[in-house]
Image: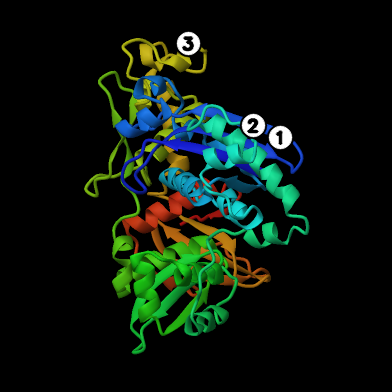
Amino acid sequence: MYAILDIETTGGKYNEEGTTEIAIYKFDGHEIVDQFISLVNPERPIQPFVVKLTGINTEMLRNAPKFYEIAKRIVEITSDCILVAHNASFDYRILKTEFSRLGYEFERQSLCTVELSKTLIPDQPSYSLGKLVRNLGIPITDRHRANGDAIATVKLFKLLLAKDVDKTIIINAVRLNPKKQVDSKLLQLIAEVPIATGVYYMHKEDGTIIYIGKSKNIKKRVTQHFTGTNRKSKKIQADVASVTYASTGSELVALLKESDEIKQHKPIYNRALRKTKYEYALYVTTNKEGYLTLNCAKADGRKKNITTFTNRQQAVLLLDLWTERYTLCQKLVGLDTSNTNCFRYTIKQCNGACILEESPAAYNARVQEFIADHSFDTQNMIIVDRGRDVDEQSAILIEDGRFKGIGYFNLNFQINTPEILRTMITPMEHNRDAKHIIQSYIRKNKRLKIIKLSK
């Protein structure tokens, strides 16, 4: 199954672009079976030359959905699909960037119709989409608009599939990243690391750690470092002499180890990761009417927060979900700034705290329930996750709302008190980054096993 797409953007600095329009056609190799087309409010200015090229301006996008509002649909329509696009590296990069802003790792295999065309239809005067399809007799309308370009790419891809008689070229072209030549030293290092979840360490000849990373597939991630063409990748490739690793089984354990050990060792190529992993935090206050209000603001280490977010877009998305789940008021969580009742009251999904119809006591009880579910400041618990082997599980200990460390235990061994676990754990420092990592992981993994402990 293929997801054939085209994206129009605002233009601007690399990796700072925003999406203005997207069209995706789900294609089974014979016909289109699903489609999604939408303008997108990029929440940033559009470059003048882009307006002239596409005809898409800020006024057209004023009431368009923001990317976080269509993100779920994009994930659904591209699930179990190979992404296909003309100059796929661009469209794929834009999608990964948009999802990264939401704290979500978007990953798909991809095919580029430019590269396929050069192989299967050689000697064309131009491989730009417009000129290529016209030379092949494929009609194209609405050039430089997502829907028109995506439909043309669907028709081009059908032609390419027909020309690839033995299918070997398409199979070899499927990839996550472009193929690069890797020298023998790096190939040997890649061969020595496993396909496993864990933390890896890159060393200079004298043993100095120059980079620490984590991955759910160490071999794949190390390969990406050694095939990358950006400045940091090239420096790592030149300096690395050996790679060691620690298998963790659990992604949460890997995230915590990575954060902790970067702070300890301060590797030269981890400078960006030494900074905090979040920008925004959620705070609770009481307004003059006695209602508990939730406020999302820039993270301030001097203030006690409920939870933290990677960025504001992620915060707004989660607040919207929590408002629905706990029957909260949009005005009291900062999602509605109107002078009257909130929108959810209009559709009978708010009990009227925004216009003082619901008592502060009744409303605050649900806010307190939300806080208890999403803040572990007073919690005593063990988070149980995957281990390094099939008969093992990992454990993360939280006492009085403070992260104490990580350990492993056999499946047949019952843990129900901190005293037992303290003998097994590797102590680690509690800090704001560790707290953010744990809260974010719990949010994303609803089926995670959590054992509440009594003091």
| Residue 360, image x, y percentages | 37, 20
Q: CA distance from mark 1 to mark 2?
A: 8 Å
Is 241 rendered above or below residue 200? Answer: below
Q: Residue at x 60, y 47 (%)?
A: 83
Q: Is residue 23 left or right of residue 346?
A: right
Tell me which amino acid carries mark 1. Ile
Q: For mark 2, what is the residue?
A: 35
| Residue 320, image x, y percentages | 46, 30
Q: Nearer the viewer, residue 186 or 325?
A: 186
Q: CA distance from mark 3 to mark 2?
A: 32 Å
Q: Residues within 10 Å of mark 3 (few under 14, many from 20)?
A: few
Is 386 rendered above or below residue 268? Answer: above
Tell me which amino acid carries mark 3. Thr
Q: Is residue 80 left or right of residue 40?
A: right
| Residue 235, image x, y percentages | 34, 73
Q: For mark 3, what is the residue?
A: 346
| Residue 9, image x, y percentages | 41, 37
Q: Residue at x 42, y 76 (%)?
A: 201
Q: Secondary structure at mark 3?
A: helix
Q: Residue at x 46, y 28 (%)?
A: 323
- Which disc, if any, is residue 32? 1
Q: Nearer the viewer, residue 350 or 72?
A: 72
Is 136 rendered above or below residue 61? Answer: below
Q: Is residue 20 left or right of residue 172?
A: left
* Mark 1 vs 2: CB contact within 8 A: yes
Q: Earlier in the sequence, mark 3 or mark 2?
A: 2
- Which disc, if any, is residue 231? none
Q: Secondary structure at mark 2?
A: strand
